[in-house]
Amino acid sequence: MKQSAYFTIIIVVFLLSTVGRLHAQDENLQAPIRIALAYYQTDEALPLIKVTASTKKNKKFVPVPGAEVNLFINEETVEGFMGRVTTHDQGSASMTLPSKFKTRWDSLISFKFIGTVTGNKQFEDQAAEIELTKARITLSLTEEDSIRTIKASLHTYTDSGLVSVPETDLLLVVSRLLSDIGAGEEEFYTTDENGEVSIPFVYKFPGDGAGNILIGAKVEDHELYGNLKATQKIPWGSPMKADHSFAKRSLWATRDKTPIWLLIFPNLLIIGVWGTIIYLINLVLKIRKLGKTSDISNN
Amino acid sequence: MNNTTSISADKITSDLLPKPFGRPGKIWTSVLIVLCLIGGIAYFRQLQQGLVVTGMRDYASWGIYISNFVFFVAISLVGSLISAIFRLTNVGWSTPLTRIAEIIAVSAILFASLIIIVDMGRPERLFNLMLHGRLQSPIVWDVIVITTYLVLSLLFLYIPMLPDLPILIKKSKLGSGLNKMYSFLGSFWKGTQAQYKLSNKAVLIITIIIIPVALAIHTVTSWLFATTYRPGWDSTNFGAYFVSGAFLVGAGGVVVAMYVFRKAYKLEAYITERHFDRMGKILVMLALLYLYFNINEYLVPAFKMKKAEEHHLMGLFSGEFSMIFWSAILIGMVIPVIVLLFPKGRKPRTMFVMGLFVVVGAWFKRFLIVTPTLLSPFLPMYDVPENYMHYWPTWEEWSITVGSLAGALLIITLFARYFPIIPIHETIEESANNKIEQL
Amino acid sequence: MINNKFPRRSFFKEILVAGLATGCHSKDPFTEKALQEEIQASGEMVQLLSTTGEIIEVDKAFLKPLEEIPSISQTAERMGIEGKKFVMVIDLSRCRNLKRCQEACNHAHFVSDAQNWIKIYSMQDAENTAPYWQPTTCMHCDEPPCVKVCPVDATFKRQDGIVGIDADRCIGCRFCMAACPYSTRVFNWEKPILPPEVLKMKYSSETSCPPRAGTVSKCDFCPDMARKGELPHCVSACPNGVFYFGDLNEDVVTNGSETVRFSDLIRDRSGYRLMEEMGTKPNVYYLPPVDRLFPYEKGLETEEEGTENE
């Protein structure tokens, strides 16, 4: 009897202290933060690292604005320090690898990016990293007998040079202002044993004034290679007609572009009426002068 | 040739000279000043807190400030009606009324400009109108025409008054402030033939040019509404509709002023019952004309009942605004017409009451033009707080509006205190030419 | 091998929803300027804490090596972005009055809930026609009646189609509000209650922030976001993909997850504009509420929740 009572007391005390600890955790000002890193690399440019910070609130993940995240390449030291970013309203921030790392970057085949949150009053210390292998997409656009072909191939860097990557999904797109639209009928094209995809390009997209459009080949969210994009500008679009309506005179334009009829007729009326008013004031002044001179002549 | 019943020049002068206020005059002026002050305090609150102190919100974004503005612009047309049109058509009996009409016009136009500044969300940026003004905007057209009309009306008030100034200079104490003011304004007037020639020429020119300008100000003001798409405003008729309404309210205003000055300054010999009789007939004509335009403005869209207009029209005929709508028509147009058709109805006191009816009815009519349309938007009033869907002016708005009306009356009152409200010289001239009507 | 503490797949949607176009630089996409320059060490050191508890000393100059995107001049703000013509397509078959668009827009532009720039109307055109929810933004008309009547050029039409408002010039006459047939403009009747650092911000007509008392505000199609290569807040916030946004000249619009050709979308789904007969030539197209994602009644739930919370 006494032993079971003793045990009960221990269990109750243990439970209470756990609850107390849980309570203490709630009162602890630091909440857990989740960081995610994403790697973006386009053409020959230095890569861009995107950081997304979120935290769990009411069983849902909400973005964390204003979180300062330190970014490192390969190691968490002063040599690997890229910079510090602050997440914006939607909880993300991005940063390009500074140019001082360029030579080091060119020599790397596999690499790691680390993002850390430390010394934050609101959140616990946290780190996240992504480890990737360098890869490149080669894009070639050819036109033969008025058949346009987009060919893209994916290669990864190894110690023995470039090796083609088969069985990988590529997106072939036409780059637009705020998004990319598919250049082919399928969303994804899988690379063959040579790491290549090839499709005919049949669409007609509006381009810039000279008819240029930007065609791209993308790898999206790959485990090993991150997000890659290769682009090429080519006059395969229809030239855009220049829109000069902004420079035209209209009722909704700025004051320097008033319609001509509105400049002529109202101004004629205004000049006519105000000219008369000036003439009238002149008459009053004349009356005044007459009065003064008759004063003088009377005196 | 002497007419035994004509009044002597001296009597005319002493009758028409401005007199100091009696007790009623002092009370009246004090009340007006107090109302202006209350309006000023309310405006100060509005400047501090923003336009949120008014009852206007996103749907009823124009309220009684704007309808008051339209009212002032409307009443200011009376200057051109009485002074110019009557002068041009050689209506001799209108001479005693010309200066009353002109001072009402000047005062109304001044306060129209003031109340518009009151309605602005950012009055300190007023000069943006000059710095960045766009000629494409109807507001800029309105500013130009109103300024033009103000200058012309001031000239129209001043130039015919020149012959009276020497009398005022003579009759005022030498060296006093008043004397200095009169001297500054007109000591150079000697009454020579050369001067008369110039002044008559000037008056004639103003008479001719002020009529189109007066028509312009109210037409352009009507375009502030007619250039939008909204039901009730999207009418090709608005210019004529507004101008006819302006003539009516102006005439009503003059009748009220006539009666008040006649009583206050004992001017029965000059503003006679015949004047009231004639103004009464004119009022009837103008009221019928305005009624005609109203029928066009309401009957025709009601016949069609377009979807967008249905809400607006039903609100006026039988809904939220029906009380004001029918009262404004009844009190402002129908009753005056009926009463004034009878000679008994054109007696001075009745005329005064009818004049008041016309003016008050016109004020509410202007409100009915401005706000109900805004509360009948094309897209439903949805997803907004309840108070956005209705409009009731706050005490600040009422105070400022009443203050502006008081201010306009104050200017007229003070003018009559220091300047002859009936032209002295012209009256003497006409009396000498036997044109004065007998009592 | 990815060695994250948490799986990344679930983040993908979040990243999209966060609104950054995939594969896009965070630089100004229109100038293609490389803002990467050699940053010189300043000599001033700053201490960072590492996750292992060590102290890392870095040069202060390297802390933020990215240049801020330069602020745009007033003239450039009034001219707009050359060669673009922004257009929005709103898919009425998908809207269920969630009001996420309103929340995002209001939050980004410091708008109070009484004066939403995006109004979601419960529409029923006639007694026998179907009810539907219609989110309504500023139409950014090609012949804007509001711009025609502004006396001081405080609201203006840009070459990229956007109708902007300069709250530093607006005199608060509210003529534009009377002129707009879509009732899309709101007025800042009172002094906005905002933190002081927000009120001190310099006003930009591209962010329409901060709101100024006594001036007019409205939806601005978020040109500041477009300059960064991002979608307007409402487009990103809608979980049902109701809003499509893009450049009419490129003939492509996107709602964040789907990118389609604008001409195909309008032709196949029979897009239309509001109050076409007014002649305002709006730049917001609507896709009719056919084959709906949700029944109309689903949208009433949000209204009820709203009244419960009041």
Image (cartoon, grey):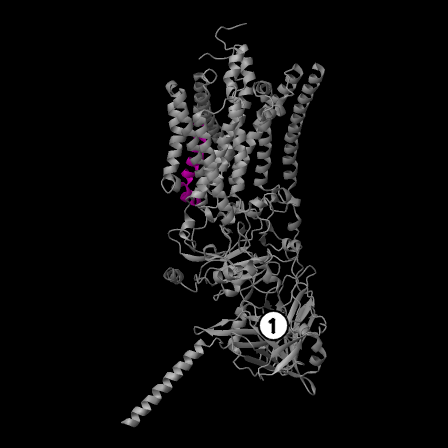
Judged left or right of residue C290, residue A116 is: right
Judged left or right of residue B152, residue B287 is: left
Quadrant, the N terminus of chain B: top right
Q: Amino acid at mark 1?
A: Val
Residue at point 71% right, 74% down?
A: C41
Judged left or right of residue B382, residue C25 is: right
Counting from the top left corner in percent of width and height, residue A89 is at 54, 67
Decide which of C118, B181 is in the foreground and name it: B181
Quadrant in which residue C254 is drawn: bottom right
Residue A164 in sight in this render: no
Quadrant, the C terminus of chain B: top left
Quadrant in which residue B28 is drawn: top left
User: Could you tell me what secondary structure mostly forms the magenta stretch?
Assistant: helix
Q: Check the image and report above or below for C74 versus A132.
A: above
Decide which of B187, C166 is in the foreground and name it: B187
Quadrant in which residue B161 is drawn: top right
Residue at point 59% right, 51% down?
A: C168
Circle 1 marks a residue in which chain? A
Q: Check the image and report above or below for A271 versus B345.
A: below
Q: Check the image and report above or below for C202 versus B406.
A: below
Counting from the top left corner in percent of width and height, residue B424 is at 54, 17
Counting from the top left corner in percent of width and height, residue C188 is at 51, 51
Q: Secondary structure at mark 1?
A: strand
Residue C98 in sight in this render: yes
Decide which of B292, B393 is in the foreground and name it: B393
**Residue A155 within the magenta-colored segment of the rendering:** no
Residue, disc 1: A85
Q: Residues within 10 Å of mark 1 (few under 14, many from 20)?
A: many
**Residue B297 within the magenta-colored segment of the rendering:** yes
Q: Which residues are magenta?
A: B288-313
